[in-house]
Amino acid sequence: KESLSKLKEDLEITSSVSFEGHQKTLIGYYRTSDALLATSEYEGFSMAILEAAYTGLPIISTDVGIASEIGATIVSPDPKIFADEISKPFFKQSYRIPDYIFTDKQKYLDIYRKNIEAALPQ
């Protein structure tokens, strides 16, 4: 946190960036944000992506967790490419929130297994 705080000062973005710490619920953050940036190289599922989709928040993500299944804008995990992509306008009208996540345990487990296998070293 200390190095990130210094970086935000160096970049002169202190009024735009805050570190909130652990929160029980994030719904207020999703509803007042411009977008969710999911920069992970690996995710098993990603509740953050699902929660953001439920609030209609635009999602820009690497191809992890359920990002592609839900309809997020998928970008490269390479930091330069990711930075270039998020500087472009992006608009998502709606997401495909898959019902099977909650209603069909086997399909959910199959997707979860696929994501874990994709994260394993080749």
Image (cartoon, rainbow, N blue to C red):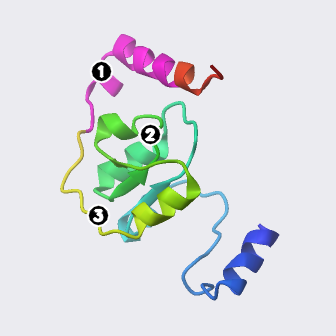
In the picture of the structure, the residue carrying the numbered disc 3 is 90
Camera sees residue 49? yes
Asked which secondary structure carries label 1, the reply is helix
Choose between 6 and 109: the one closer to the eye.
6
Q: Is residue 16 left or right of residue 3?
A: left
Choose between 74 and 81: the one closer to the eye.
81
Residue type, numbered disc 2: Asp
Q: Main secondary structure of the magenta part?
A: helix
Camera sees residue 28? no
C-alpha distance separating marks 1 and 2: 24 Å
Q: Which mark is residue 11?
A: none
Q: Are marks 3 and 2 in contact (CB under 8 Å)?
A: no
Q: x%, y% of residue 89?
A: 30, 69
Q: x%, y% of residue 16?
A: 54, 82
Quadrant (top left, top right, bottom left, bottom right) of the C terminus: top right
State the extent of the magenta-drawn residues as a range.
Answer: 97-115
Seen at 57% across and 57% down, the residue is 79
Q: Residues within 10 Å of mark 3 (few under 14, many from 20)?
A: few
In the picture of the structure, the residue carrying the numbered disc 1 is 103
Q: x%, y% of residue 7?
A: 72, 77
Q: Which mark is residue 63?
A: 2
C-alpha distance separating marks 3 and 2: 17 Å
- Seen in the picture, residue 36 relative to 107 is either above or below; the reply is below
